[in-house]
Amino acid sequence: MSCKIGYFGEFGGRFVPETLFAPLLELEEAYREVASDEGFQKELKELLKSFVGRPTPLFYAESLSQMAGCRVYLKREDLCHTGSHKINNTLGQVLLTKRLDKRRVIAETGAGQHGVATATAAALLGLECEVYMGEEDMRRQAINVVRMELLGARVIPVISGSRTLKDAINEALRDWVANVDTTHYVIGSVVGPHPFPTMVRDFQRVIGDEAKEQLLKVEGRLPTHCIACVGGGSNAMGLFTAFRDDPCRFIGVEAKGAETLSGNGEIGVLHGFKSYFLQDEWGQITPTDAIAAGLDYPGVGPEHAFFKETLRCTYRHVSPKEAVEAFRTLAKAEGIIPALESAHAVAGLLAERWNEQDLVLVCLSGRGDKDLSEIIEKGVLQ
Amino acid sequence: MKGITERLRELTQRGRCAVIPYITAGYPDWDTTKALLQRLPEAGADIVELGIPFSDPMADGPVIQRASEEALKKGINLEIILKGLQELTTKPSLVAMGYYNPILRYGIERFVERAVSAGIGGLIVPDLPPEEGEELIEAANRHGVATIFLIAPTTPRERIPVIAEATTGFIYLVSLKGVTGSDVGSLKPILERVDEIRSLTSLPVCVGFGISTPEQAKIISRHAQGVIIGSAVIKRLEEKGIEGAVRFIEEISEAVV
C-alpha cells in the first residue's frame, strides 16, 4: 500500500478547497486521539449497547439457506435503533463533534436513513442539526422528513444539480466551507476526504467484529463468504473489515443504474476523494438511477476501489427486478422486510451458485418500512 | 506571450492593481464568451479568469453553479474551449479555473500542453491542494504555465510558505469562509491577511470570492496586486448581457488604484 496519507493504494486523498484543508488535519488529529481514548470508546460502546441495542442478532436464515443451497446467516443491522446501521457511525461522529467543541452538525441524506440517524444522535447529545436532502427525495421519503423534524433537525431542500444525494453532498460541503469553525460535517458513508473513509469504516466495523464472534460461537468456523450491498459502501466495509485478513471471500452488490465498480465507473475525483465514478468522456458526473435511494450514488468509497484493484472483493450488480424479488422472498420466507438497499445483498446471494459447505454471512443493513410508500407508488410488487 | 507573474509585476510597477474578471466558458454560449474575451480587456480587465464548467462545482455559490449548469446543458466541453481559444487571434492574458476531475479525465499532460498552446498562462484548480497536486505542478512547470494556489481564511500562517512554494503565478487569497459570491463582510481582516502573505512571499497576491462592488475593489487594490470578480460579473451578464458586464468592469477598472 502507498505510504501517502489517507490513501488506499492510489485511492482516497484530500481533494478539497483550501478552506477545508486545515480543519481536516484537525479532524484527523482529533480522531486519532479518540480512537485510542478509553473514555471515548467506553462512552460510545455504552451508547451502542443501551441506546442502539447492540449487539444486533446474528440470524440463521433456514428457508433462505435452502433456496441458496448453503448455510446463510443474516447480520441484523435492521434491528438497530432508527432502523439501519447508519446510527453506528453517527453516534461516533457526533460524540467526536463534542470533543471538537463544535455545537452544530450537518449531514446529507438520500433516502433519509443517515439523516434520521444523525438527527437522532444530535438530539441525544444536544447538538444543533441540519440535514441536506434532494427536493425529490424529500417528496418520496416524506415520513423520514417528519422523523428528522420531530428529532429537532432542520431539513434543507436541495434544488441544485440533479437534486439527489450527490447534490446534497455538494450542498453540505458548501455549508461546511462556510461554517467550519462551529460545524462538523457527519458524512454518512466511507466516502469524502481523509479521514472520513477510515473513520466511518472504523465506526462501522462493529458489524463485522460482532458477527465474527457470534458466528464462531454457533458454527465454530469463519464464513467462507461475506455479502453486502454497496452504494458508498459503509455497511459493506463495516462487515468486511473484521475478516479482511481471513481466507474469506467478499462480494459487494451494487444496484443496476449505479454500478460504479461492476459497470462503467472510471477513475476520477469527486467530493474530496479519488475513486471510481460514473462520468462521461469529459469528466462530468452522470446521473444515477438505482431503485434504492441509499445506493443511488455515482461513486464508491476509496477502500472499495482498492479492494477491486487488488481483487480482494468481487463487485457485481443486480437489477431492480432481482432486488424486489429478494425483498418479497425475505419477507415471505423469513418474516423480515428488508430495506431495498439490503434486498440487493440478498439478491446477490440468490444470484450466486453455492456449495453445500459454504457458510455465507449477509449484512442486512436496514429495515424496509421506509420503502413501502415508494414501492406502492412504483407498483413494483405487481 | 508573457507569463502571468511578469504581467502582474509590470502592473504593480506602474502602480496598478490588476482587474481580473471571471467568466464561465460557454455561458450563456460560446459566442458570448468569445465576445467577452475581446471586450473585457478594452474595458480594463488586465487578466481574464476563464471557468471550465463542471457538474459538481463544490466551491461555487448559486450564481456560478447556474452558469456552469447552463453552459454544460448547451454542450460545452474542454475540447470546444481549448480549440475555441486557439482560434482566437487576439486574446487577453488568461488563467483557467477548473475542477480537477475534467482535467484528470482529459489527461493532465495533454491538458497542460493544450492549455499552453491555447494561450492559457495560469491554472487554478480549486479542489486540488498542493499536497495532491504533484503531477499537475510538475507538468505545469515543465510546460511553462503558472500554477495558482489558494489561501483561505482558515489557512494557518505556517502553511502559507507551503502553498507559496507550489505556486508560480500568484497567490489567490480567498476573502471569506464560504463559496463564491457570498457576502464578504468587513474588508479589514482581508487587507491584514494580504499584508501578512506579502511579508512571507514575494509572489503577487490577488483577492477573490465575494468582491462585488467598485468600492470594495478600490479598498482591496490598495493592498493587493489583483482583484478577482466572479459572481458579480456573471450576475451582470445574466441581467444585462455583454454590455452590462463590460460596463461593470469599466466601473471596477476606474475604481482601482
Image (cartoon, coloured by chain):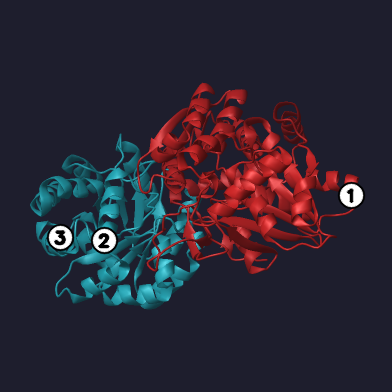
Q: Is residue B51 above or below residue A61?
A: below
Q: Check the residue under mark 2 and report the chain it is in.
A: B
Q: Colour of chain B?
A: cyan
- Which of discs 1 and 2 lies nearer the camera? The answer is 1
**Disc 1 packing (10 Å; few <14; some 14–19; many ≥20):** few
Disc 1 chain ID: A
Label annotation for residue A120? none
> Marks 3 and 1, how far apart in space?
70 Å
The image shows residue B255 at horizontal and vertical percentages of 14, 46
Asked if badge 1 and badge 2 are on a common chain, one would say no
Q: Residue B32 bears which disc, if any?
A: 3
Q: In the image, residue A270 lies at what x, y percent?
A: 47, 56
Q: Disc number at residue A219? A: 1
Give the chain ID for the red colour: A
Circles 3 and 2 on the same chain: yes
**Badge 2 element:** strand
Question: In the image, which is nearer the foreground, mark 3 or mark 2?
Answer: 3
Q: Nearer the viewer, residue B240 or B72?
A: B72
Please state which amino acid type lies under the numbered disc 2.
Answer: Leu
- Structural distance between the alpha carbons of marks 3 and 2: 13 Å
Q: Secondary structure at mark 1?
A: helix
Residue B13: image location, x then y, percent = 21, 61
The secondary element bearing badge 3 is classed as helix
Residue A190 is at least partly visible in this image:
no
Q: Chain of mark 3?
A: B
